Image (spheres, rainbow, N blue to C red):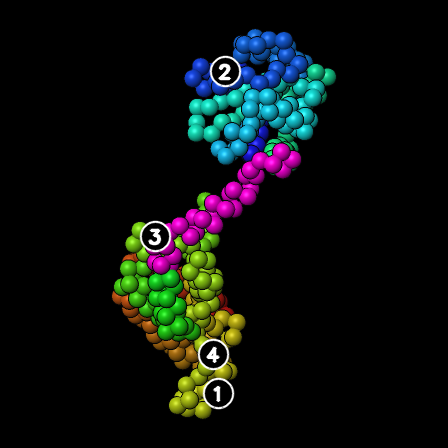
């Protein structure tokens, strides 16, 4: 059994609905009411609810679902007891309410429309009222030996995962390809990331970035054929942040590199900015102070700036050639931000002169 509850403003419409011909199966209970027809019931409830002028949603709509396997052991008399017990445990003893059963769907269910304003003018507190209704339904189900909705939901989720062997087989295939490529290009920086995406595209695996309403990326989605998988289903290494860290450039230096180059690179490398990032750190050149004249220093800086700008253009061109079309916007944006940082650093150097 499952229970739902919600505060509503359209009490007249709700009463018309539960008494509609073709839906109505049986009338179970009328609590603190003299009338038996929807319009008269609404007018009777309105007399009480009009005492409170500040409350907007003056009615409660409650739905109690009965599991198909429990219908045979629940006659009308037992459904009446369930309706009364449910309303009592929800704290509606001093409120007006009506309960009926519907059989317009595959499963029989109970509808209760209650006046949110009590006979003493108090407003029923609807804080977490839906959770309260679910808890009351579970308690009644346990006491009467009925099916508990929470257990059925967990069983269905388990069966759903095992009922589609094709999807599981496809997921294992995608996992194998992704892990193989990740091992191949791990720690190779932005170039390795581009080749990783390129090889995935060659294997007909597409990666889609999931964005929230503010346009911020919060996760990745992998698609292969007609099947779609969240990044967490493929593996922990393939989350949005985790995947970036896997491609960060390795700090290992090749053994055949000259000792002097190793020493120089260690001196001028900022460990904070090393590694692959979606927006690479600034590569602006800051020459060491020398005893040269200001004119010579200015010429050296201009030549260095021109070389860096040319290198950035070449990187952008190569990135566009090796990066799949679906991710070209990221690298274009990164290149644009590099140019902005380069221009900012250039202005700062000019001010220092």
The answer to whether residue 142 is seen in the rendering is yes
Residue 185 visible here: no
Relative height, residue 40 to residue 352 (above, below):
above
Sequence-wise, which precedes: disc 3 or disc 4? 3
Residue 167 lies in the magenta-colored region: yes
Task: Determine which residue is flagged by label 4.
Answer: 251
Q: In this picture, which residue range is highlighted in magenta?
A: 142-171
Q: Is residue 59 left or right of residue 107?
A: right
Alpha carbons under labels 3 and 2: distance apart: 44 Å
User: What's the distance in space between the residues labelled 3 and 4, CA to CA?
Assistant: 38 Å
Q: Main secondary structure of the magenta part?
A: helix
Nearer the observer: mark 1 or 4; the answer is 4
Q: Secondary structure at mark 3?
A: strand
Mark 3 and mark 4 residues within 8 Å of each other at the beta carbon: no
Dot 3 or dot 2: first in sequence order is 2
Do residues under tags 1 and 4 come within 8 Å of each other at their CB atoms? Answer: no
Name the N-terminal-most of marks 1 and 3: 3
Q: Distance of mark 4 from mark 2, alpha carbons?
A: 74 Å
- Horizontally, residue 38 falls left or right of residue 347, namely right
């Amino acid at each position: 059994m499952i229970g739902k509850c919600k505060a509503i403003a359209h009490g007249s419409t709700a009463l018309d609905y539960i008494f509609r011909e073709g839906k109505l199966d049986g009338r179970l209970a009328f609590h603190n009411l003299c009338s038996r027809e929807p319009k008269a019931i609404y007018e009777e409830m309105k007399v009480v609810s009009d005492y409170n002028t500040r409350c907007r949603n003056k009615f409660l709509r409650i739905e109690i679902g009965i599991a198909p396997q429990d219908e045979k052991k629940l006659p009308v008399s037992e459904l009446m007891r369930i309706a009364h017990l449910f309303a009592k445990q929800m704290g509606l003893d001093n409120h007006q309410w009506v309960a009926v059963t519907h059989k317009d769907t595959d499963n029989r269910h109970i509808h209760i429309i209650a006046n949110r304003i009590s006979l003493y003018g108090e407003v029923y507190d609807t804080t977490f009222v839906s959770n309260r209704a679910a808890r009351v339904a579970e308690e009644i189900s346990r006491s009467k030996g009925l099916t508990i909705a929470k257990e059925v939901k967990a069983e269905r989720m388990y069966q759903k995962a095992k009922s589609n062997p094709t999807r599981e087989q496809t997921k294992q295939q995608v996992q194998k390809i992704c892990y193989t490529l990740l091992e191949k290009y791990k720690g190779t920086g932005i170039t390795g990331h581009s080749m990783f995406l390129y090889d995935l595209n060659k294997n007909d695996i597409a990666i889609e970035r999931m964005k929230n309403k503010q346009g911020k990326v919060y996760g990745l989605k992998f698609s292969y054929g007609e099947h779609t998988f969240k990044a967490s289903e493929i593996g922990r290494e393939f989350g949005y942040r985790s995947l970036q860290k896997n491609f960060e450039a390795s700090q290992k230096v090749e053994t055949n590199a000259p000792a002097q180059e190793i020493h120089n690179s260690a001196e001028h490398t900022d460990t904070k900015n090393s590694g692959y990032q979606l927006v690479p750190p600034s590569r602006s050149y800051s020459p060491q102070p020398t005893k040269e004249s200001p004119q010579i220093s200015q010429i050296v800086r201009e030549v260095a700036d021109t070389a860096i700008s040319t290198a950035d253009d070449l990187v952008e061109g190569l990135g566009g050639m090796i990066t799949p079309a679906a991710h070209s916007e990221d690298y274009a944006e990164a290149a644009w931000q590099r140019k902005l940082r380069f221009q900012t650093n250039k202005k700062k150097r000019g001010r220092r002169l």
